[in-house]
Amino acid sequence: MKKIIATLLIILLAGFVGFICGDFLGKRQKQEATAPNQDFTFSGNFLNRQLAYKRVQDAFRNKKNIILQDLNSFNIKPSVVNIIIVAYKSENILEIHAKNKQDSIYQKIISYPVCSPSGELGPKRQSGDNQVPEGFYYIDRFNPKSRFFLSLGIDYPNNSDKIKSEAQDLGGDIFIHGSCKTIGCLPMTDDKIKEIYIYAICARNNGQTKIPVYIFPFRMNNSNWEHYKIKYIDNKELIKFWGNLKIGYTKFEKNKRELRVTIDKNGEYKFQ
């Protein structure tokens, strides 16, 4: 009986949440639709599986109005939202950029402070160095029962990290997560991770299976670039690595489109 009641509650919440993520069409809307329904159904979909967890349910209850307001102010529909997550280590800032699925141009929706920094500027190259990675990644895990409330896994180490590191153990398990404590991750507090997690859930549920995460050491505009080149003038390898990241940074800032990233045999990022 308890399982039946719990299942019914999840179904009811899924119908309610569907208004946010776009998975619900009312009876009248279905009758009036002239094209095949492109929305996801509840049965077995990603959103429904996530809603089996109380923390995700609570996040939607607490943050639904904020998410709707933020997206509506940019004329972005939750039913077709795609996102890019961008972080700047020196500023301790994480940004959500979003667009409608059918559009090409992303808009910055909101910025969040990273609650606590870890390590220093520069890439992560081995386990235990306390470093937050730098580079171009994707969300590869959603953890609704994390030790840090809710968490989004980053696919570190990517092929660039593997090629450029000489360490036997590069480490892993890098997350954007709740709480305000971390070693090598991006802690956002339990309150703000609710919003970030909802954005990511909606995007994933709308078919965005590879949500980009761009992590830069700093905002790589020309003035900052000149400043940090002088500050780290003795670290030629680091400046070269950052110069590679700057190409991607400049391209994204100019075009506001998702970067098409490949990695060559030397671990260099290439941008099409």
Image (cartoon, helix red, strand yellow):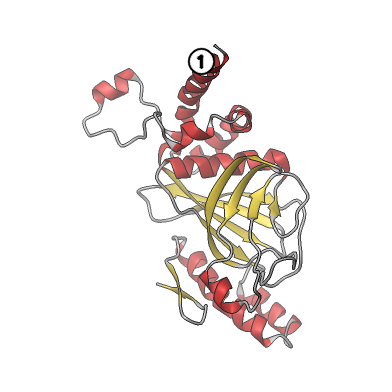
Seen from the viewer's position, the closer of residues 189 and 185 is 185
The crowd level at tag 1 (other Cα within 10 Å; few <14, some 14-19, many 20+) is few
- Image quarter of residue 193: top right
Residue type at mark 1: give it.
Answer: Ile
Residue plotted at (32% across, 18% down): 27
Residue 201 visible at all: yes
Residue 76 visible at all: no
Q: Outermost residue toward the top?
A: 1
Compared to residue 45, the image places residue 30 above or below, namely above
Identify residue for label 1.
4
Q: Is residue 229 left or right of residue 163?
A: right
Quadrant showing the N terminus? top right
Seen from the viewer's position, the closer of residues 252 and 175 is 175
- Image quarter of residue 255: bottom left
Q: Residue 29 appears at what percent x and percent y? A: 31, 23
SS for dot 1: helix
